[in-house]
Structure formats: C-alpha cells, structure tokens
Image (cartoon, rainbow, N blue to C red):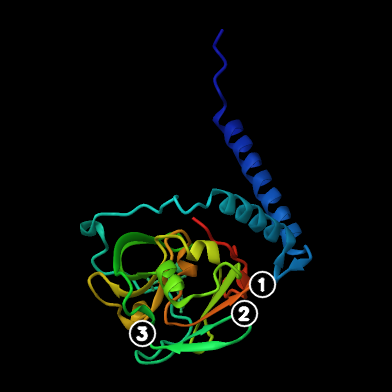
Amino acid sequence: MSASKPDPARMTRRAFAVFAGAGLAAAAGWGWLRTRPTEGGIPWPLRWMHRLNEGIGRALFSERHLAPEFPEESRAAEPRVNGVIGSPAKVDGAVRVVGPDGAEKRFTPAALLAGLPRVESTTELKCIEGWSQVVTWGGVRFRDAAAHHRWPVDACEYVSMTTADAGYYVGLDTASLMHPQTLLCDRMNGEPLPVDHGGPLRLVIPVKYGIKNIKWLARIAFGTERPDDYWAERGYDWYAGL
Ligand SMILES: Nc1nc2c(c(=O)[nH]1)N[C@H]1C(S)=C(S)[C@@H](COP(=O)(O)O)O[C@H]1N2
Ligand SMILES: [Mo]
C-alpha cells in the first residue's frame, strides 16, 4: 500500500481555481467601487476610508510625536526632483499672507523669515508613491513665524498654501503646521534652496507625506473651512498624515 502522494496536476488546478477566484472577486470589487456615487470626485467607499485614516491620523497626532531625524551623513547625495506642478516663484517676489477676513500682507521670502531662530533638521521626505529620501532642510519653524507675525492660528483651524500661479495648492490643518518640525524652508543640504526643490521658499512638514510639502510657496491663507487641495481632488487622502 502506498501512502497517498499529492497529485501535482490536481494541486495546480486547485491553485489556479483559487487564483482565478481571487482575480474575479477583485475585478467584481473594483467594478462595484467604480460605479459608486462620488463624493468630492472619488467613489464614496474610498472617501470613507480616507475619513477613517484621517480620524486615526488626528488621534495619533501630537506635538510630542516627532518624525525621525537622521545624521546628516545619511542624507541623499543628489535629492531627486519630483514635484513639477505650479510655477516657480520669483526670488524677490511677494509671499502673500491672508487673514480670514481677506486682509492681505506682502513679504519677500527673506523678510518673512528675518530675525527668527534658524533651524536645520535632517528628515525623510516621503512621497506617497513609495520612495523616500533623507534631506537636510534649513529655515524657520512655522510656529515661530506665526508668533512673530501674529498669525491667527487660534481662530483658524485651516491654512491654504499655494504657488504664485495657484497651479499647486495644499490644504493643511493648523495643528500640523504648528508642529515643532514644520519649517518655512529656504535652505537645503547647506545651500540656498534650489529652484527645482521649491526655492526661494517651500514648506517642509515631516509629519505629512511629500504631497503637502509645497514648493514655490507664495500665498498663505488662514481660514475656518477645509481648503482645496490639489491631490485630495485627485483621490488622495486630504490629511495625508504620517
Ligand atoms: N509646487 C509643487 N510642490 C510640490 C509638488 C508639486 O508638484 N508642485 N509635489 C509634491 C510632491 S508629490 C513631493 S513628493 C515633493 C517632492 O519634492 P522634491 O521635488 O523637492 O523632491 O514635493 C511636493 N511639493
Ligand atoms: Mo510625492
């Protein structure tokens, strides 16, 4: 009597059936998802998942929860340029700061940061597409600029940031901007911030994915409603917390 040996042909047929079944289920699921009514341009089940993620993100967020910092030696030798949406701002161009009442003040990028404590920190820029790189950023803390310029951070839960041509725009929660690692950044890897990487001024916000780290920052507007966001309109998570 021989011990029953597995029949390779049968095993293969079974594996194939499982594989095909999973494929059909995924296709059916995708078809279902695609035909759901949309909310803010994306199917409601995805919007619902984003809300769930945001709830968890906000619950985990705290001023004391720091993104990891790295030794300078571990930074990328040649940081890749990724974001190309929106037009670069002029070095001497205005950065407009707009209150909830629409009142506007203009600064050059240098004037916006003048006299504030300079900070350097080496953190990881994480793109939502899966890659990341370690970069040494220099600038001033957003929270220091907010205190110095008396920005209405207590009255306004949200901030909209845009490029000069409004081609790229991000919506941010004020709490994340006030995080100690969030910088108005004008230097990168020990040099003035190159135009490719957002010079003269970009936002560095290591508690969020790369999409929120807007380059060529030219307008900062405070408000009480959740601002438009370039990538949220294209299906990504509005909060984009890490
Ligand atoms: N103005 C502007 N800022 C932007 C983007 C963009 O397309 N335009 N892309 C974002 C994304 S998705 C990433 S990952 C980072 C990439 O920064 P880098 O080009 O300096 O590597 O910039 C962010 N800021
Ligand atoms: Mo990205």
Q: Secondary structure at mark 2?
A: loop
The residue singled out by tag 3 in the image is 111
Q: Report the amino acid beneath label 2.
A: Pro
Residue at (38, 88) in percent of width and height: 108
For disc 1, the marked residue is 225
Q: Residues within 10 Å of mark 1 (few under 14, many from 20)?
A: some
Q: CA distance from mark 1 to mark 3?
A: 28 Å
- According to the picture, the residue beneath numbered tag 2 turns out to be 100
* Residue 83 locus on image (x, y percent): 43, 75
Looking at the picture, tell me which residue is in the foreground, 89 or 235: 89
* Element type where label 3 sits in the image: helix
Identify whether 81 is placed above or below 165.
Answer: above
SS at mark 1 in the image = loop
Residue 44: quadrant of the picture: bottom right
Counting residues from the N terminus, which is met first, the one under dot 2 or under dot 1? 2
Neighbor class of circle 2 (other Cα within 10 Å; few <14, some 14-19, many 20+) is some
